[in-house]
Each structure stands twice: as structure tokens, then as C-alpha cells.
């Protein structure tokens, strides 16, 4: 009788032990699956967020590029007009102050679209908060400068050009210098947009594709490069 009881007990113990091991393994596998699902979700969210952010930044770069090009050509158009003996029509000198403001409005709108998106995905983009703060500081500076430059350009246009009065050489040089100064701020912001795009790609896409994009390396140390911390 005792051998039967002992045998039954051992069989029961083995069965219980086997059941416990099976349950433990199932729990471990379940936790691993949950962790893998979490990692997959995080990865997909990161890539989707990066893709949308890069798309918005690219739009900002396009709009700022239009403003940058306009400012590059504006003073030269006037010099060309004055250097020739026949009438040259330049569309850039049709209320240039209003054109600059319109180009800036388009740029500012696209910049803010990215900012709003960033804030709605800050949990995903948390390592770039420092970059975003510098980005917004530069935007604030640009807003102040655009007001001053637009006012100057409006005065120059309506008091001189609109009335057919040629600008003196000194006034032309001032126009070139003030336009160049403003455009340097625009170009700096363009550079920051470029830096942001590079950092996002390197952070979220480089591991997948096995390639990292070199960061910008300006020759002049006065120019900053935005980097994620």
C-alpha cells in the first residue's frame, strides 16, 4: 500500500512541478512578448514621429529658402537697374516690404507648424527639447529683426524708389548691408533647420539603415551647430 501511495505522491508532485514550470515559462514568454510589443510600438512611434517632423522641417526650409533667395537678389536688382540706360522692370521691387513680410509670414507659419507638432510629441522627441528651445529663441530674434528691416525697406521704397528718385551710392550700400545683415539671421535659422533634420535622421533612422549623416561643421566658430543632448 505504501509503495502505491508514495508512487502516487511522486507522480502528483512531478505533475505539479511540470505544471508550475510550464506556467512559469508561459508567464516569462508572455512578459517577453509584451516587452517586444512595447519595443515595436515605441520604434514605430519614433519612426512615424521623426518622419512627420522631418517633413514639417523640410517645408520650413523650403519657405525660408524662398525668403533667403529674395533677399540675396533684392539689392542687386536695383544696382542692375541703375547701371543700365534703359528701363528694367523688376518684380522684386514692387512693394518689396510687403513681399518680404509675405515671405516671412509663409516661413513663420511653417516654422510654427513644426513647433506645435513637436510639443504634441514631446514625449517621443524629449531628447531634442534643448534644440527646440534654441530654435524658438532664434525665431523670436528673427521676428524683431523683420519688423525693423521691413520698416526700413518700406521707407526706402516709398520715399525714393516709388517716386522715381535714385538711391545714392551711400544709400545703396546701406541697403546692401542691412539686407545682408537680415539675411544672415535667415540663413542661420535655415542652418538650424538643417541641423534638426540631420539629428532626427541620425537618432531614429541611422541604426535601421546603417548610415549616419555627418553634422554641419562651419569654418567660422561664431556659427552654432544645433545638436541633441
Image: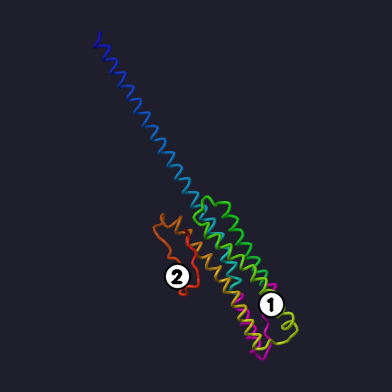
Estimate the x, y position of residue 35 in percent, counting from the top left: 43, 41
| Mark 2: secondary structure | loop
Numbered range of the magenta stretch: 70-99
Is residue 87 part of the magenta span, yes or no? Answer: yes
Going by the image, does 16 lie left or right of 158?
A: left
Where is residue 50 shown, x and y percent of the image? 51, 55
Task: Determine which of the numbered discs, if any, sits on residue 162 in the image.
Answer: none
Give whichever of 227, 72 is nearer the camera. Answer: 227
**Above-or-below relation of 215 to 149:** above
Please identify the dominant SS of the magenta region: helix
Looking at the picture, tell me which residue is in the foreground, 202 or 80. 202
Q: Residue, x 72% and y 83% (percent of image)?
A: 161
Is 122 left, or right, of 8 in this rendering?
A: right
Farthest-out residue, bottom: 85
Residue 83: in magenta span: yes
Real-space CA distance between mark 2 and mark 1, rounded to the nearest whole angstrom: 34 Å
Figure check: 194 above or below 16 = below
Residue at numbered disc 2: 217
> What percent of the width, then of the height, locates residue 8?
29, 15
Quarter residue 30 falls in: top left
Hey, which residue is sitting farthest right in the picture? 163
Residue at left 40%, top 60%?
Answer: 211
Please report the residue visible at 59 percent of the width from the left and 68 percent of the height from the top. 64
Q: Which corner quadrant holds the N terminus?
A: top left
List the single residue furthest toward the top: 1
Q: Quadrant of residue 98?
A: bottom right
Q: Residues within 10 Å of mark 2 (few under 14, many from 20)?
A: few
Instruction: Give the residue at mark 1.
Output: 152
Position of 181 with respect to 154 (left or right) is left
Amino acid at each position: 500500500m505504501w509503495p502505491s501511495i508514495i508512487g502516487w505522491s511522486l507522480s502528483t508532485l512531478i505533475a505539479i512541478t511540470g505544471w508550475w514550470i510550464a506556467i512559469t515559462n508561459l508567464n516569462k514568454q508572455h512578459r517577453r512578448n509584451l516587452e517586444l510589443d512595447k519595443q515595436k510600438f515605441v520604434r514605430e512611434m519614433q519612426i512615424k514621429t521623426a518622419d512627420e517632423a522631418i517633413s514639417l522641417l523640410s517645408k520650413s526650409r523650403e519657405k525660408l529658402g524662398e525668403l533667403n533667395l529674395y533677399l540675396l537678389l533684392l539689392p542687386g536688382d536695383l544696382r542692375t537697374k541703375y547701371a543700365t540706360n534703359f528701363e528694367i522692370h523688376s518684380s522684386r521691387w514692387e512693394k518689396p516690404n510687403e513681399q518680404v513680410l509675405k515671405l516671412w509670414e509663409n516661413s513663420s507659419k511653417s516654422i510654427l507648424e513644426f513647433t506645435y507638432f513637436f510639443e504634441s510629441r514631446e514625449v517621443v522627441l524629449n531628447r531634442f527639447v534643448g534644440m527646440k528651445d534654441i530654435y524658438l529663441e532664434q525665431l523670436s530674434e528673427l521676428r524683431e529683426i523683420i519688423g525693423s528691416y521691413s520698416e526700413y525697406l518700406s521707407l526706402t521704397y516709398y520715399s525714393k524708389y516709388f517716386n522715381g528718385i535714385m538711391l545714392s551710392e551711400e544709400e545703396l550700400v546701406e541697403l546692401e548691408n542691412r539686407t545682408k545683415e537680415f539675411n544672415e539671421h535667415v540663413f542661420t535659422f535655415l542652418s538650424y533647420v538643417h541641423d534638426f533634420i540631420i539629428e532626427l535622421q541620425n537618432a531614429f533612422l541611422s541604426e535601421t539603415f546603417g548610415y549616419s549623416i555627418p553634422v554641419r561643421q562651419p569654418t567660422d566658430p561664431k556659427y552654432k551647430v544645433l545638436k541633441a543632448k
